[in-house]
Image (tube, rainbow, N blue to C red):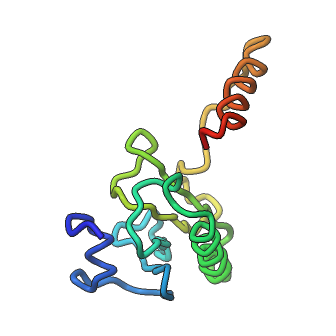
Amino acid sequence: MSSECVFCRIIKGEIPCAKLYENNDIIAFLDIMPAVKKGGHTLVVPKKHYEFITDMPDELIAKAMSAAKRIACAVMKEADGVNILLNNGKAAGQYVPHVHFHIVPRYKGDKIGLAHWEALKYRKGEMEKVQERIKKLFEEGIC
């Protein structure tokens, strides 16, 4: 674990957290800067340090998503909905370089912009080009 990473420091117990769940591989705790006024915004974090989800073993991703599902179920008992988010890389809004899933409670009329973006359209033939480019990388075993 990187001693510089805030989540690694939380996992090691150097920084306190409002822990909701923990097992050998995963920890979940309340975000100290929640996206909603009513609280409940939770981070689900693998205990082993990985910067990107693409670095994580599939089994660990499954464990993290299982924990995220359980947290989301609990959160939805009080909320109208939930967003489960992963920001992978700085351009995607990842501020802490340690994989973490956000479980964000949603309420009718909360005006949080997490789930909204401008829906664009492909130009004629563009979708097929993008499809082939990504499919080729996938089939070449890049991922």
Which of 138/9 is in front?
138
Work out whether residue 89 or residue 41 is closer to the camera in this orientation and state it. Answer: 89
- Identity of the residue drawn at 70% across and 28% down: 136
Q: Residue furthest front?
A: 140
Q: Position of residue 40 (x, y in %)?
A: 50, 76
Where's the N terminus, which quadrant? bottom left
> Which residue extends farthest top?
124
* Above or below for 91 versus 70: above
Q: Quadrant of the C terminus?
A: top right
As drawn, is 38 to the left or to the right of 98? right
Quadrant assignment, res 140: top right
Towards the viewer: 8 or 55:
55
How many numbered circles are shown? 0
Q: Percent position (x, y) of residue 61? A: 59, 66
Q: Quarter of the image holding residue 83?
A: bottom right
Q: Is residue 105 left or right of residue 5?
A: right
Instruction: Name the spot of residue 65 as percent of width and height, x first.
Output: 63, 70
Determine which quarter of the picture holds residue 9. Answer: bottom left
Going 78% across and 20% down the picture, which residue do you hit? 128
